């Protein structure tokens, strides 16, 4: 099973879908146009069932194989949403909407899964059912979580799930994956420091919240450098520090800080959550101020199950022969983790070549990757449900 010849024939059509999505980016759950086009195409391909409105604007298409001897159901997932970025690629099919851009390549993922759907509906060379999962709001909205909470996995009897993401810096046609944790858990925190504002020339009459905030920022660095085992991954970043003073001579009453925490291990995650709170409130108290900490857990760790990862590697090997089966994990986070928490499966990277990084205004998905990605999706269905 090398790159399937059918995808060479379908490439112009799949590329046209991809560029159409690229030209019309939509954010978060507001992907009505994209989801509508996906559903229309799935019906046109002859999917046995197409269900819209799962997890608000998600779409699931079902394709039955030639036989169904064991009730197998394999889920293949792509994401549909874009990012709030002003596109700077200068492409003739660049975004028509200022401030919205397919800068993460989800246009490519959706098009590649549609290509696989068209092929699978034509050939049906498998024993069971393929569930094509198109999710909204991967970029921070938890669209995958909403589809799971909507009962998608039970409703369609999905037994395994497979997802893919393009990756700049890896050659086109090369796959990269690893067993276990491949993407981090992403949490966020808000720290509100309250002191006593006043005249900057009379600091002794104030409790200077900027000084307190500065001590907290420095003390938080000890979580990663002193608190966590150096062999475990952790990121603690304070990204916003805002005071309520805009003057040169006013000590602010309040400072608000916002930041992110990335971890790969539940114990480290619990530890960091506790320490952010203890360090912020303890430091504030020591300096005569107070701090209120709000810590919110976001996307969980994306964990590739052992056996499904082996199958994903094997199919990628057959598609292109270029696979890194032990790629380094990334401290970014991925909403597909909610599906992987419920079902065994795997998440693989597909090279996007030497392009700008995802989330950059000059990024673009490389259409040359389409035959590889579509072949992998289709190959996963055929490999996990071999025709009798
Ligand atoms: Zn992204
Ligand atoms: Zn993405």
Image (cartoon, grey):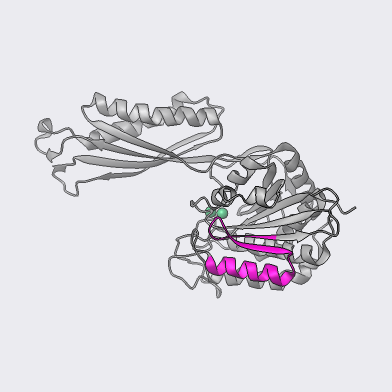
Q: Name the side, left or right, on which 320 lies relative to 78.
A: right
**Residue shown at the point (15%, 39%) measured from the top left:** 197
Dividing the picture into quarters, in which one does residue 91 lie?
bottom right
Q: Nearer the viewer, residue 360 or 302?
A: 302
Q: Name the side, left or right, on which 130 lies relative to 138.
A: right
Tell me if I can see residue 328 in this picture. Answer: no
Instruction: Give the magenta-colored segment's residue range.
Output: 32-61
For the N terminus, which image quadrant? Answer: bottom right
**Residue shown at the point (67%, 70%) measured from the top left:** 41
Q: Position of residue 176 (x, y in %)?
A: 68, 47
Q: Residue furthest front?
A: 155
Q: Position of residue 212 (x, y in %)?
A: 25, 32
Q: Position of residue 49 (x, y in %)?
A: 70, 63
**Residue shown at the point (13%, 33%) measured from the top left:** 206
**Residue shown at the point (75%, 70%) measured from the top left:** 10
Total labels drawn? 0
Q: Position of residue 281 (x, y in %)?
A: 31, 28
């Amino acid at each position: 099973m090398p790159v399937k010849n059918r995808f060479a024939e379908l490439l112009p059509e799949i590329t046209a879908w991809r560029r159409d999505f690229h030209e019309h980016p939509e954010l978060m759950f507001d992907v009505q146009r994209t989801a509508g086009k996906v559903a229309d195409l799935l019906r046109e391909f002859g999917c046995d069932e197409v269900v819209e409105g799962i997890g608000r604007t998600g779409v699931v298409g079902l394709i039955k194989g030639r036989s169904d001897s064991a009730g197998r159901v394999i889920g293949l997932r792509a994401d549909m949403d874009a990012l709030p970025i002003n596109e700077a690629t200068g492409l003739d099919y660049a975004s028509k909407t200022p401030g919205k851009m397919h800068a993460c390549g989800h246009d490519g993922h959706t098009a590649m899964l549609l290509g696989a759907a068209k092929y699978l509906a034509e050939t049906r060379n498998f024993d069971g059912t393929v569930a094509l999962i198109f999710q909204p709001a991967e970029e921070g909205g938890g669209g995958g979580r909403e589809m799971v909470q909507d009962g998608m996995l039970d409703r369609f009897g999905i037994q395994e799930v497979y997802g893919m993401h393009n990756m700049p810096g890896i050659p086109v046609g090369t796959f990269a994956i690893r067993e276990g944790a491949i993407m981090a858990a992403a949490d966020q925190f808000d720290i509100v420091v309250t002191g006593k504002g006043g005249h900057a020339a009379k600091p002794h009459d104030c409790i200077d919240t900027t000084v307190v905030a500065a001590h907290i920022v420095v003390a938080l660095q000890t979580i990663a450098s002193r608190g966590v085992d150096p062999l475990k991954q952790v990121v603690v970043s304070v990204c916003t520090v805002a005071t309520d003073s805009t003057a040169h001579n006013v000590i602010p009453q309040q400072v608000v800080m916002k930041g992110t925490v990335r971890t790969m291990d539940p114990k480290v995650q619990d530890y960091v959550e506790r320490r952010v709170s203890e360090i912020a409130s303890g430091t504030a108290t020591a300096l005569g101020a107070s701090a209120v900490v709000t810590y919110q857990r976001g996307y969980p760790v994306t964990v590739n199950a052992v056996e499904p990862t082996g199958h994903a590697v094997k199919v990628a090997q057959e598609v292109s022969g270029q696979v890194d089966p032990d790629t380094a994990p990334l401290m970014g986070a991925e909403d597909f983790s909610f599906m992987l928490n419920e079902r065994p499966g795997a998440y693989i990277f597909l090279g996007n070549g030497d392009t700008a990084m995802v989330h950059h205004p000059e990024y673009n998905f490389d259409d040359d990757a389409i035959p590889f990605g579509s072949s992998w999706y289709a190959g996963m269905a055929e490999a996990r449900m071999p025709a009798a």
